[in-house]
Image (tube, rainbow, N blue to C red):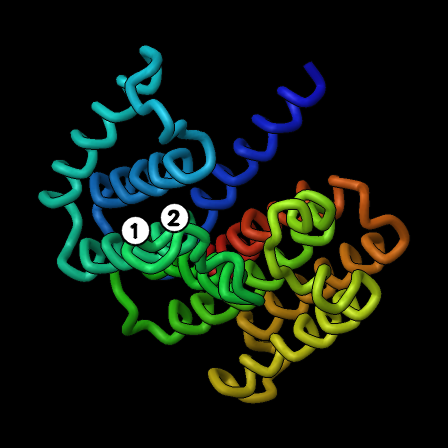
Amino acid sequence: MKNWFKRYFIKLLFLIAAISLVLSGIVLIQSTSVARALISVYIAMLGTWLLYGFDFRDPFKSGWQRIFVLQLVMTLVLGFYFLNAFQIGLLFAMALLSVMYQFNLPFITHRFHLKRFLLVKNVLIGFSWAALVPFGAHTFDDTAVQFLFWFVAIQVGYGSIIRDISDIDHDAKQQLRTLPIYLGVPKTLLFLHLINILSLLLCLLFVGFDPFSWLFQLSFVVVFYKALILLQVQLNHRKLIWTQYLNILTCLLIFILTFWFNS
């Protein structure tokens, strides 16, 4: 029962994270229609469940899976009507990234799997999740959308390395080449602290050194939050509350701050 709760609780957190990033993009632009906003959020939810909760081994094995497939098809059809060309193209790009991450590539070797390569998995995860921000905003022309895309890509990308720390034993058995396996946990944590601090440099590219800019303030709060998580992981990297739960909720924090500064 405990393992069942843990498994589905993490999936719920992923759904919250996906919704949060789409809503962040919507809040930034504030010019989208209600129908487009709702369909964008719902597609993000279905896509997240498709990756983390759907059983591809037997897609029609149960009633709820058949219902899921039906609503996925219907929602995608509606999406072609309500979404603009940019969102549709981005949706295909996110799907491609997800396929590259999840599946073995055909016609090469049976064991060829992109996520077995060092940091490739983390980069793919970072960009695919960050794409939810411009997907919700339905544009990439806005400066704040561009900043949040790159900032989320870094935060989610190295957040996936934090999750790799708690999965180090499982990944070793699967012969995956993750950073905690390659460097060891202590050196990996030092590397993550460095990346976390360097993510603040994005502000210099977009707004310069302006402590009064909301982009700088958002970045500072998130970087401070992740620094606290990393310190706790250093004390005990087996505790899922730090490596998984609160780590995944970084996306919710980003939405809350985006909403706060733009309301």
User: At x 30% / y 53%, what residue is drawn?
Assistant: 106
Q: Quadrant of the N terminus?
A: top right
Horizontal side of 20 relative to 194 (left or right) equals: left
Amino acid marked by disc 1 = Ala
Q: Are marks 1 and 2 in contact (CB under 8 Å)?
A: no
Image quarter of residue 160: bottom right
Image quarter of residue 141: bottom left
Q: Residue 203's spot in the image, x, y percent?
A: 55, 80
Q: Residues within 10 Å of mark 1 (few under 14, many from 20)?
A: some
User: At x 39% / y 72%, what residue is drawn?
Assistant: 146
User: At x 73% / y 73%, what residue is drawn?
Assistant: 191
Query: Who comes first in sequence, dot 1 or dot 2?
Result: 1
User: At x 53% / y 58%, what residue is drawn?
Assistant: 116
Closest to the observer: 62 or 201?
A: 62
Q: Which residue is mark 1?
A: 95
Figure check: 36 above or below 229: above
Query: Of the numbered discs in the image, which one, if any, rests on residue 199?
Result: none
Q: Residues within 10 Å of mark 2 (few under 14, many from 20)?
A: few
Q: CA distance from mark 1 to mark 2?
A: 12 Å
Report the mark closest to the observer, 1 or 2. Answer: 2
Q: Which residue is mark 2?
A: 103
Figure check: 123 above or below 106: below
The furthest residue to the right: 235
Q: Residue 34's spot in the image, x, y percent?
A: 24, 41
Horizontal side of 52 relative to 217 (left or right) equals: left
Q: Residue 252's spot in the image, x, y percent?
A: 56, 47
Closest to the observer: 153 or 58?
A: 58
Amino acid marked by disc 2 = Phe
Figure check: 248 above or below 212: above
Closest to the observer: 57 or 190?
A: 57
- Any part of residue 195 in sight: yes
